[in-house]
Amino acid sequence: LTQWSKGTCCAKGGGVRFSEEPPAAGAPSHVHFDEKLHDSVVMVTPEDDGNFLVKVGFLKTQHRYEIVFTLPEVPALGKDVCPAPVPSPHLRITDITPAPEGLKVMCEYMAQQEGVLCEEVLLLSETNEDVCVRVKVQARVMDRHHGTPMLLEGVRCIGVELEYDSEQSDWQGYD
């Protein structure tokens, strides 16, 4: 208990760290986390090769999502950026706009099958044809019959694509 009161509590692999100084009279006390909590936001991770991995969390099959994320600035890419004209059947960029932190990217994603899925798009510089950045969007997709996932900040469901189920049809064939 004396370690807690001295403000030296530490945990392996990250945790809570209390301020070493006692708070001044009337000042709020603060708790500092060793690691940022990323559980509720879309994660954009730069990769060693200059490309990006975007983790969008749990999604549901047969659902269409709008995903918005910000890529850090890539000076070689510039501010005038467009998606490569290579169509992806499940991931489509709908808008790219410059933002103070880099590029704000808006896309639509159709989750077709269960599992950990990764779709790729290429961003091209409109001023330098030799520069492109690969963006991999990774999602954990669960079956549509297994509940509703809590969506991360930056992800919203914009539609459901229901499959035709012949067993639920009321159409009767004629002999």
Image: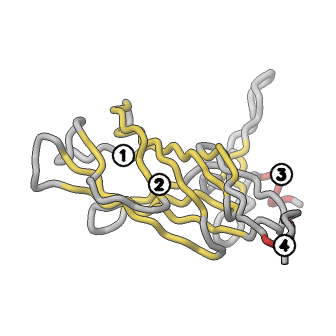
Locate residue 86 relative to residue 129 in the image: left or right. right
Disc number lying in front (3 or 4)? 4
Q: Quadrant of residue 113?
A: bottom right
Q: Position of residue 121 (x, y in %)?
A: 36, 59
- Give the residue pinned by disc 4: 174
- Specify the color scheme: secondary structure
Look at the numbered discs 2 and 1 and tell me whether their residues touch, using CB distance below 8 Å: yes
Please name whichever residue, 57 or 15, is drawn nearer the observer in this view of the structure. Answer: 57
Residue type, mark 2 in image: Val
Q: Residue at x 63, y 76 (%)?
A: 115
Locate residue 117 relative to residue 53 in the image: left or right. right
- Give the residue pinned by disc 2: 44
- Give the residue pinned by disc 1: 72
Residue type, mark 1 in image: Pro
Q: Position of residue 131 (x, y in %)?
A: 15, 54
Above/below status of 69 relative to 45: above
Numbered circle sitting on residue 5: 3
Give SS at disc 2.
strand
Query: Tag 2: Cα neighbours inside 10 Å, few (<14), some, or many (≥20)?
Result: some
Q: Residue at x 45, y 66 (%)?
A: 119
Q: CA distance from mark 2 to mark 1?
A: 8 Å
First-in-chain label (3 vs 4): 3
Residue type, mark 3 in image: Ser
Give SS at disc 4.
loop
